Image: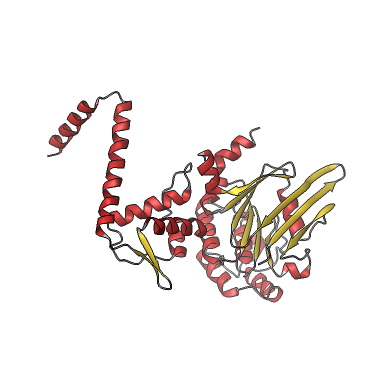
Amino acid sequence: MPWDLDNDRPIYLQLMERIQQDIIAGVYAPGDKLPSVRDLALDASVNPNTMQKALSELERSGLVYSQRTSGRFITEDETMLKKIKLDLASEHIRQFFEKMTLLGFKNQEILELVQETLEEDK
Amino acid sequence: MKPILECQGLTKKYNNFYALSNLNVTLERGQIVGLLGPNGSGKTTLIKLINGLLTPTNGHVMINSMAPGPETKKLVSYLPERSYLNDHMRVEEILSYFSDFYDDFDAGRAGIMLKDLEIDTRSRLRTLSKGTKEKVQLVLVMSRDAELYVLDEPIGGVDPAARDYILRTILTNYNENATILLSTHLITDIENVLDRVLFIQNGQLSLNTTVDEIRTNQGKSVDTLFREVFKC
C-alpha cells in the first residue's frame, strides 16, 4: 500500500514524519537497520530521490545514522527518542487545542470535556 | 557527466504556427521528469524532436551530446503516443523482434512483467483490448536498459490498478543513472513519483522546478498549480 500522503505539503517532509512516527511507535526498534532507500521508496510509492532526501534530513536530525557500507540505523540514544516522542505529543495537543478553540471552547472547558470523555470510557 | 538531454533554442514551425519556440532545457541523469502542458502546447513535438522523428526549424536537441540518430536511439527508449507495432504479430514475436533490435533489451524482465499483468504472450496484438495493447508497449519500452526513457502518455489508457503497477514498474526498474521524461495529464497519479516538472505553454517552457519546491513555495500540489496556470 502506498503511504497516505497529503498533496499540498512537501513530500519529503511527510516521509520524514511517517518514518519518525514508525520509530516512535516501535515499528523499528533502537539500533534497527532501516530498509534500503529503494525499498522504502517502493513501499511508499514515491521517487527514490525524495526518499533519499527524507533520510538525509533524518540523519541530520540525529534520529538515524549511517554506516558507510552497511546502511542506515535507528539511533540508540534513548533520551533523544524520548524527546521526540514528547515533541510529537505536544504537537498533537497543540493542534487539538487549536481545533477546540475554533469551536468556541475555553481552555478550562476543554479540560473538563477531556475529563468527562475519560470518565465515560472507563 | 554530460547531461542526458539538452535543448537549445529549439524551434519547430509548421507553416506559420510555432509548435515550439526557442525552448531551452537541460536534463541531468537520474531523475523522473514530468512533461506537463495543455493539449497542443508542444509536448509531443518536443518528444518527436528528441527521437529524431522531426527535425528542428531552428536550434538543436542533443542526447548525451549527440544529435538524434542511430547512436542516440541506442540510448533512448521511446514510447510513442500511437503504436507502430504490427497488429498481426503475437506478443512473443514482438519480444524476439525487440531482442533483435535492441542490445539492451531484457527479455526476461519483459516476460515477468507480462506474466504479472496476466498477458498471454501467444496472443496476437489485434485480439487485445486497447488498454492491454498499451500495457504490452510500455512493458517493451521499460524492459530496455536505456539511459533516457521518453514516454508519451504512458498511463492514459489503462485502468487505475494497472496504473499503480506501471508506476511501481517504473520505480523498480529504472536505474539510478537513467532519466525518464514522461508526458501526461494524470498529474495526481504520478506526482509522488516525479522529481521535477516541466510546464510547457504555447511552445515555450514556463516552469522547470521540483515537485517539493512547488509544494514548499506555493503550498499546493502540482495538479492544483497546473489547474491554476492553465485555467481555461
- What is the count of numbered marks? 0
Q: Position of residue A28 (x, y in %)?
A: 31, 61
Question: Is residue A58 placed above or below B113 in the rendered structure?
Answer: above
Give the residue drawn at x 76%, y 66%: B66
Quarter that holds the N terminus of chain B: bottom right
Give the residue drawn at x 27%, y 58%: A26
Q: Nearer the viewer, residue B63 or B89?
A: B63
Q: Position of residue A9 (x, y in %)?
A: 47, 43
Q: Nearer the viewer, residue B154 or B18?
A: B18
Q: Position of residue B83 (x, y in %)?
A: 70, 59
Give the residue drawn at x 30%, y 37%: A94
Question: Is residue B39 placed above or below B103 in the rendered structure?
Answer: above
Q: Nearer the viewer, residue B99 or B232?
A: B232
Quarter that holds the C terminus of chain B: top right
Give the residue drawn at x 69%, y 73%: B102
Q: Position of residue B209 (x, y in %)?
A: 60, 48
The answer to which quarter of the image holds residue A90 is top left
Residue A47 visible in the picture: no
B94 sits to left or right of A104: right
A104 sits to left or right of A15: left
Residue B75 visible in the picture: yes
